[in-house]
Structures are given as C-alpha cells and as structure tokens.
Image: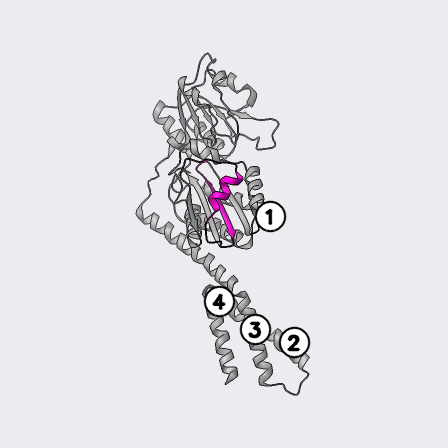
C-alpha cells in the first residue's frame, strides 16, 4: 500500500520548507534508515525548492505514519507548518498530477519531471525502492514527459529563473549592459544565465574548481572563482544566487562592507543562499516571490487532466495484473488437472503432466497477455470457480 506526506509552497513559507530541504545524499540516508523498518518495502524522498515529500510502499498498519517517519528520521522534532498526507489511490493520482505540472508553483514547468526521475534513480541505485514504487514513479515520469510534449503551455520554458529575469526586465526596463553575478551553475543558474545573455547583460558566473559538477558555462558569460565572488558583486547591478549549498553564499558581514552594493539580490535556492540581514543593504527577493503566473486555457488544463487519468489507469492496470499473478498460476494448475483427468488415461502420467502443464502455461500466458488492461484477481477467481464447477459436473 502507498502512503505519502509532504510540505510544499502552497501552505508553507520558504522559512518552513528549508527545514526539510535535503541533499540527495541526505535523502538517501533517511530513505535507507526508513527501509530498514520491518513493515516498509520502499521509500523515495522528493526534495525540491518548492516541496519535500516522502513516498512509502509498506504494509497497511491502519494509519498513515509517513509524516511521523519523515520528521523522526530527519530529526525534526517540531514543525510549525502544514504537512499534507495521502494514501492508496490518492497517492497514485497525486503524483501523476505532480509530474504533469498541475501542482507546480509555475504551472507546466518541466523541471519537476526531471526531479521525480532523479529521485527514483537515486533511491533505486541505493536499494530503497520495491517494484510497486518503482513502477509508480516510472509511469509518472512517462506521464510528465507526455504532457510536456503534447500540451504547449508556453513557447518559453517557464521556471523561477525565468520569472526572476522577467521581474528584472520590468524593474530596469532595459537590461542591456547591466552587470550581473550569477552564483551557481546548476540547471536554475544556467537558465538565468541564458536569459540574461539574451537581454544583453554582462554576466559573471561563479564556479567551484574543487567540485566535480558542471564547469561549462553558457556562451557569453564569464567564469569567476567562487571565492572571488564579492570582488565582482562590488559594483554589480544585481545578483542571482541559485545553488544547492547548505550554507549561505552571501553573508551579511561581508556584504555590508562592499563599497558599491548591488541594487537587487535574488535568492532562488532552498535552503536560502542569502542571509536575511542583507535586506538592510539592498532589495532582496526569494523564490516564493516569483510564483510566475502562466496563462493557460481551461481547454489545456482539461487535456492535462485527461493525461493524468490515462496514466493513472496504466498504473492500476499494472497493479491489477500483478495482483492476479498468483490466481493465474492457480488457474493454470486447475486447467492442467482438468485436461489430464478428461483424457490420456493410458499414457504415462508424468509425461502427460509435463506436456499439458507446459502447453497450458503458454496458452494462458498468450491469452491473458493481450488482456492485461482488463484483468484483476476477481476475474481470475471467477474463471477458477467456473472450471471447478464444470469438473464436478
């Protein structure tokens, strides 16, 4: 049975969400510890800027304890935000909605699909998933990719970075020749770089030379050493920080001593990159202030929900077939015995059992293989009942 619990941007501020923001290594460590429990079969933790959610495949103990496990193993003993919980079919439908972009702060943004896929890959590599959870996430990723490909929500990739650059364009009217420092060269940082270069900005990008991550920068940007970032921020018009660092990339003590401070600092990270006191020195904005409103028609929303329904059915068809496997094996055995008893009385029984058994196995597999979308344990049990009744006649 599936259980999930999570916090997201709708009911929790960045100050609350960052308490539950995990690196992939920390998410795996928590998942492995939870999977060590006797009644838990699989665990995946999805941690992004907008949400942290735990998904469990486990024995039904009569209570959804996903939130308790998340807080306990994260060593968070008091959480003053709102934690939503779902179970069973609700979990299946919800993750399909999530992957299709319906639940995103920026409707239709494509990053969530990659984030769900990455959470699955990391958990799978570290032995934290079972077949049910693995299949659920794989189908959700397929749903998200299908929605992105078939529903043209916007001609421009939407993200918090896009919303931030749009805000800057409105703030300055013209960004040409404005000087900007982008701290972080991950996906969010690169989106910001690309958009700023198109606007004619002079963009400086920090790189950490000792890390094995992506050291390629967008064409038109200038790479600078992370430790020299304050030298370039001094005199810059604005700064965008978007890293996965657990520590501040900009601290008040160093920022306040700059001779020519930037007008604006934008923090697109969770947990936050920018120390809150810096707001005393210039305008500061965090990711929650860039909930970019994507204009999307009701017709397109309906199409997305059709996709959600379609892939939800795909999962339940898989689940029904899996639940039917034991009954199918019993059905094969009943058919084999019925055939053997109805004839072949003068032939070696061992040979007949083997021949009939193999034939029945292949025949039943071929027949039911084309009906996977319609099979469930009740149907198979009904077949078994009918065969037994006819045998008694």
Tag 4 or tag 1, which sits nearer the N-term? 1
Name the secondary structure under disc 2: helix
What segment carries the magenta color? 48-75
Q: Give the vertical position of 386 relative to 290 (above or below).
A: below
Q: Residue furthest top?
A: 259
Residue topped by disc 3: 332
Residue topped by disc 4: 377
Tag 1 or tag 2, which sits nearer the N-term? 1
Asked whether, in this view, residue 350 is left or right of residue 156, the answer is right
Q: CA distance from mark 2 to mark 3?
A: 13 Å
Disc nearest the viewer among 2 and 1: 1
Tag 3 or tag 4, which sits nearer the N-term? 3
Which quarter of the figure has residue 15? top left
Which quarter of the figure has residue 28? top right
Say if the magenta span includes residue 4: no
Mark sitting on residue 127? 1
Residue 249, image x and y in percent?
Answer: 51, 24
Q: CA distance from mark 2 to mark 1?
A: 38 Å
Kindly identify the residue that appears in the image at 40 percent across and 41 percent down.
104
Residue 121, image x and y in percent?
Answer: 56, 45
Name the secondary structure under disc 4: helix
Disc nearest the viewer among 2 and 4: 4
Q: CA distance from mark 1 to mark 4?
A: 29 Å
Which quarter of the figure has residue 295? top left
| CB contact under 8 Å: marks 3 and 1 | no
Q: CA distance from mark 2 to mark 4?
A: 26 Å
Mark sitting on residue 354? 2
Kindly identify the residue that appears in the image at 49 percent across and 80 percent down.
389
- The 10 Å Cα crowd at callout 1, few under 14, some 14 to 19, many 20 or more, is some
């Amino acid at each position: 049975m599936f259980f999930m619990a999570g916090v997201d941007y709708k009911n929790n501020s960045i100050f609350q969400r960052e308490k539950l923001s995990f690196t992939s290594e920390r998410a795996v460590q928590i998942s492995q510890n939870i999977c060590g429990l006797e009644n838990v079969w699989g665990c995946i933790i999805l941690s992004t800027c907008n949400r942290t959610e735990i998904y469990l495949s486990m024995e039904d103990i009569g209570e959804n304890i996903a939130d308790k496990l998340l807080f306990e193993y994260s060593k968070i003993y008091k959480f003053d935000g709102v934690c939503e919980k779902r179970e069973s079919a609700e979990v299946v439908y919800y993750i399909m909605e999530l992957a299709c972009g319906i639940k995103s702060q920026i409707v239709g943004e494509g990053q969530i699909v990659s984030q769900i896929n990455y959470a699955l890959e990391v958990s799978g590599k570290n032995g934290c998933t079972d077949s049910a959870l693995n299949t659920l996430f794989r189908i959700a990723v397929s749903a998200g990719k299908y929605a992105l490909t078939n529903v043209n929500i916007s001609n421009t990739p939407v993200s918090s970075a896009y919303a931030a650059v749009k805000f800057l364009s409105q703030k300055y009217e013209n960004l040409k020749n404005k000087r900007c420092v982008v701290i972080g060269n991950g996906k969010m940082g690169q989106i910001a770089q690309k958009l700023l270069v198109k606007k004619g900005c002079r963009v400086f990008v920090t790189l950490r030379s000792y890390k094995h991550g992506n050291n390629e920068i967008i064409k038109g940007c200038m790479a600078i050493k992370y430790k020299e970032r304050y030298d370039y921020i001094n005199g810059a018009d604005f700064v965008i920080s978007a890293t996965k660092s657990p520590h501040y990339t900009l601290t008040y003590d160093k920022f306040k001593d700059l001779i020519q401070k930037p007008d604006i600092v934008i923090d697109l990270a969770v947990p936050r990159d920018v120390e809150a006191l810096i707001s005393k020195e210039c305008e500061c904005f965090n990711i929650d202030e860039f909930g970019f409103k994507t204009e999307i028609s009701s017709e397109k929303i309906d199409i997305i929900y059709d996709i959600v329904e379609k892939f939800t059915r795909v999962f339940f068809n898989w689940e029904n077939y899996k639940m039917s496997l034991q009954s199918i094996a019993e059905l094969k055995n009943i058919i084999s015995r019925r055939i053997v008893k109805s004839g072949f009385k003068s032939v070696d029984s061992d040979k007949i059992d083997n021949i009939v058994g193999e034939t029945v196995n292949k025949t039943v597999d071929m027949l039911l293989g084309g009906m996977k979308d319609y099979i469930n344990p009740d149907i198979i049990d009904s077949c078994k009942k009918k065969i037994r009744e006819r045998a008694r006649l």
